[in-house]
Image (tube, rainbow, N blue to C red):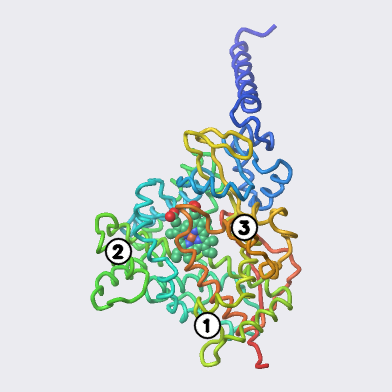
C-alpha cells in the first residue's frame, strides 16, 4: 500500500501521464492535421524540427521525407512541409509575411542587425523579416524601382573594378590552390559596397575577412537551437546583446563590426555630397532620391537600414552561390571547355576577358544553362520558407489545413523532384538547352532560390548580373582545377547552405 506522504507524488505522476497521453491522442487522432502523414515525433513536438535543423542536413532530409510520405508532410504539431510545384503559387501568392521556423531565423538576423544598428544610431527599417504587411508593401513599392533590370543596367559597371581586381588576385595566386569560398565572399562584399556607395570596402586586398565571416555565421548558428523554443531563443538573444554591449564598451564606443561604422560614414557622405554627385548610379544615390521624394514613407532611418541590409543580403548569398557553380562546371573538363569556347566568341582582348555586360552575357546560351543548372542543384536556401495559413484555412493536395498552420516549401524538394526533372542528381546544362518551351516555363516556376511572392528577394536581378559576370570572367581568363574533387565537401545548412574549405587552382589560360 502506498504511504501517505508518497500519495500526492503518485497522483501527480498519474495526472502527468494522463495529460501526456491525452495530448498524444489528440495530436495523432483529433488534431486538424492528424490525417497528414509524417514522423511520429514530429506530430507531437516541435523539438523534432528543431533537432532536424540542428543536424544541418534538412535539405537532404526533406527530400527523403517527401519520398516516404508524399507531397504534404507533417513536420510539427501545427506545421507542414509541401513538396508540390503547384503549391508555390498558393503558398507564396497569398501575400503573407514570413513566419515561424523559417522566419525565426530571419527574425533572428533582423534582431541581431538591429541590436548592432542601435549601437550606431539606427534600427527598425529592414525589409528582411518585416512583419507589418501594409508597411512592407508600401516600402517595396518605393524601393523596387532600384532593382529593376533597367536600374541594374545603369549600375552594373560599378561591379567591374572589384571583379577585375579579383581576377588580378587570382593571377597572383595562380601557382597555389586558393580557398574559393573565402575569395568569393570577400569579392561579394567589395562588389556590393561598390555598387551601393561607389567605393569598395576593400577586403579583396587581403582575400579574407575572418571577422565578417565569423559574424555572419554566428548570426545564424545559435538560433538554430532556438528555432521552436522561445525561452531558449530569448536567452540566446540576451546573451548576444550582452556580448555586443561588452564589445562596444571595451572598444571605447566603436561599432562592433568595422563595416558598420564604415557604411554609416558612406551614407552620411552620400547625403552631404548629394548635389555634387548628380545622377551617379549608386544604389545609395537612388535610395536617397526616394528618401527626398517621400520623406515620410521612407524616412532617414529606413534609408540607413535598407542600405545596410543590402550588403548583408547580397554578400553571403552570392558569395556562397558562385563557388558552387564554378565547382560544378570545373569538375568536368567538357563543361569547362564548352563554356570557354562560347565565352571566347564574345570576350574582348583589350579589357579583362569576359567582363561583359549582363545583357551581352544573357545572349550566351551555354553560360545561362550552366548557371541555371548550378542554381537548380544547389539552391542556397536550405530550409522551408514558411508562412502561416490565413484564418479561412487552405486545401492542399487533399488535406484541409486550418488557419494558423505553418506551411512552407524547402526549395531543394522541388528542384530534385524526379517527376519534374529527369535524373535530377546529374549536373546537366544541356537539359536547359534541349528543354521544350513548356519545360522551361515549369522550371522557371519551380525556382524558389530567391523565394516567390511579395517578399521575394528584391536583389534577384542584381544577384544574377553579378553571378553571370563573375562566372564569365573566371572561365574566360582561367582554367580551373578543383583540388581533391572526389573528396566529400564539408557543408553546413544554417538557412543558407554553405560549403567550406573548397580549394581550387585558377591558372591563366594560354592563348590558343
Ligand atoms: C544568390 C543571391 C541571393 C539569394 C539566393 C537571395 C535569396 C533571398 C531569399 C530566399 C529571401 C527571403 C524571401 C522570403 O522570405 O520570402 C531574400 C530576401 C531579400 N533579399 Fe535576397 N538573395 C540574394 C541576393 C540578394 C542581393 C544581391 C540583394 C541586394 C542587392 C538582396 C536583397 C534582399 C532583400 C532586401 C530581401 C528582403 C525582401 C523583402 O522581405 O521584401 N538579396 N533573398
Q: Nearer the viewer, residue 183 or 391?
A: 391
Q: Residue at x 64, y 20 (%)?
A: 17
Crowding near the residue tagged with mark 1, few <14, some 14–19, many ≥20 C-alpha atoms within 10 Å: many
Circles 1 and 3, Cβ within 8 Å, touching? The answer is: no
**Could you say whether the residue bearing mark 2 is in a helix, strand or loop?**
helix
Location of residue 12 by image quarter: top right
Q: Residue at x 33, y 76 (%)?
A: 280
Q: Earlier in the sequence, mark 1 or mark 3?
A: 1
Q: Which residue is mark 2?
A: 290
Q: Residue at x 61, y 13 (%)?
A: 11
**Relative image position of residue 42 (x, y in whole percent):** 64, 36
**Could you say whether the residue bearing mark 3 is in a helix, strand or loop?**
helix
Circles 3 and 2, Cβ within 8 Å, touching? The answer is: no
**Can you say which quadrant of the picture contains the C terminus?**
bottom right
Q: Which residue is mark 3?
A: 442
Query: Closer to us: mark 3 or mark 2?
Result: 3
Location of residue 344 by image quarter: bottom right
Vertical position of residue 57 compared to residue 374: above or below:
above
**Could you say whether the residue bearing mark 1 is in a helix, strand or loop?**
loop
Q: CA distance from mark 2 to mark 1?
A: 31 Å
Q: Which residue is mark 1?
A: 355
Whether residue 313 can be seen here: no
Q: Earlier in the sequence, mark 2 or mark 1?
A: 2
Amino acid at each position: 500500500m502506498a504511504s501517505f506522504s508518497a500519495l500526492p507524488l503518485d497522483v501527480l505522476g498519474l495526472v502527468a501521464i494522463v495529460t501526456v497521453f491525452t495530448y498524444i491522442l489528440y495530436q495523432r487522432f483529433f488534431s486538424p492535421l492528424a490525417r497528414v502523414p509524417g514522423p511520429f515525433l514530429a506530430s507531437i513536438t516541435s523539438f523534432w524540427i528543431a533537432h532536424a535543423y540542428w543536424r544541418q542536413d534538412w535539405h537532404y532530409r526533406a527530400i527523403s521525407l517527401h519520398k516516404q510520405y508524399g507531397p504534404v508532410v507533417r513536420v510539427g504539431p501545427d506545421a507542414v512541409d509541401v513538396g508540390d510545384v503547384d503549391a508555390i503559387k498558393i503558398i507564396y501568392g497569398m501575400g503573407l509575411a514570413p513566419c515561424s521556423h523559417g522566419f525565426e531565423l530571419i527574425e533572428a538576423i533582423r534582431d541581431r542587425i538591429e541590436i548592432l544598428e542601435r549601437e550606431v544610431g539606427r534600427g527598425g527599417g529592414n525589409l528582411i523579416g518585416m512583419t507589418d504587411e501594409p508597411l512592407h508593401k508600401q516600402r517595396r513599392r518605393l524601393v523596387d524601382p532600384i532593382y529593376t533590370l533597367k536600374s541594374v543596367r545603369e549600375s552594373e559597371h560599378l561591379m567591374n573594378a572589384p571583379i577585375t581586381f579579383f581576377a588580378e588576385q587570382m593571377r597572383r595566386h595562380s601557382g597555389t590552390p586558393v580557398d574559393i569560398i573565402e575569395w568569393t565572399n570577400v569579392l561579394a562584399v567589395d562588389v556590393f559596397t561598390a555598387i551601393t556607395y561607389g567605393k569598395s570596402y576593400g577586403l579583396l586586398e587581403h582575400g579574407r575577412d575572418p571577422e565578417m565571416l565569423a559574424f555572419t555565421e554566428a548570426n545564424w548558428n545559435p538560433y538554430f537551437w532556438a528555432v521552436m523554443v522561445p525561452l531558449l531563443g530569448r536567452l540566446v538573444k540576451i546573451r548576444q546583446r550582452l556580448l555586443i554591449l561588452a564589445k562596444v564598451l571595451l572598444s571605447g564606443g566603436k561599432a562592433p563590426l568595422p563595416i558598420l561604422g564604415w557604411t554609416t560614414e558612406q551614407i552620411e557622405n552620400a547625403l552631404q555630397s548629394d548635389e555634387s554627385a548628380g545622377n551617379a548610379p549608386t544604389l545609395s544615390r537612388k535610395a536617397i532620391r526616394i528618401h527626398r521624394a517621400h520623406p515620410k514613407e521612407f524616412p532617414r532611418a529606413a534609408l540607413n537600414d535598407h542600405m545596410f541590409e543590402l550588403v548583408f543580403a547580397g554578400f553571403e548569398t552570392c558569395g556562397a552561390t558562385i563557388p558552387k557553380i564554378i565547382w560544378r562546371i570545373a569538375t568536368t573538363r567538357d563543361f569547362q571547355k564548352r563554356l570557354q569556347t562560347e565565352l571566347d566568341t564574345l570576350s574582348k582582348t583589350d579589357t579583362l576577358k569576359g567582363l561583359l555586360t549582363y545583357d551581352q552575357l544573357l545572349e550566351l546560351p551555354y553560360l545561362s544553362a550552366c548557371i541555371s543548372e548550378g542554381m537548380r542543384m544547389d539552391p542556397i536556401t536550405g530550409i522551408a520558407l514558411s508562412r502561416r495559413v490565413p484564418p479561412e484555412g487552405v486545401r492542399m493536395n487533399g488535406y484541409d489545413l486550418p488557419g494558423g498552420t505553418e506551411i512552407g516549401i524547402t526549395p531543394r524538394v522541388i528542384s530534385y523532384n524526379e517527376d519534374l526533372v529527369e535524373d535530377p542528381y546529374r549536373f546537366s546544362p544541356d537539359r536547359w538547352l534541349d528543354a521544350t518551351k513548356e519545360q522551361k516555363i515549369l522550371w522557371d516556376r519551380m525556382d524558389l532560390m530567391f523565394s516567390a511572392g511579395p517578399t521575394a528577394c528584391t536583389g534577384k536581378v542584381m544577384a544574377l548580373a553579378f553571378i553571370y559576370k563573375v562566372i564569365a570572367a573566371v572561365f574566360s581568363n582561367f582554367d580551373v582545377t578543383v583540388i581533391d574533387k572526389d573528396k566529400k565537401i564539408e557543408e553546413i545548412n544554417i538557412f543558407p547552405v554553405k560549403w567550406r574549405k573548397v580549394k581550387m587552382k585558377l591558372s591563366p589560360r594560354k592563348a590558343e
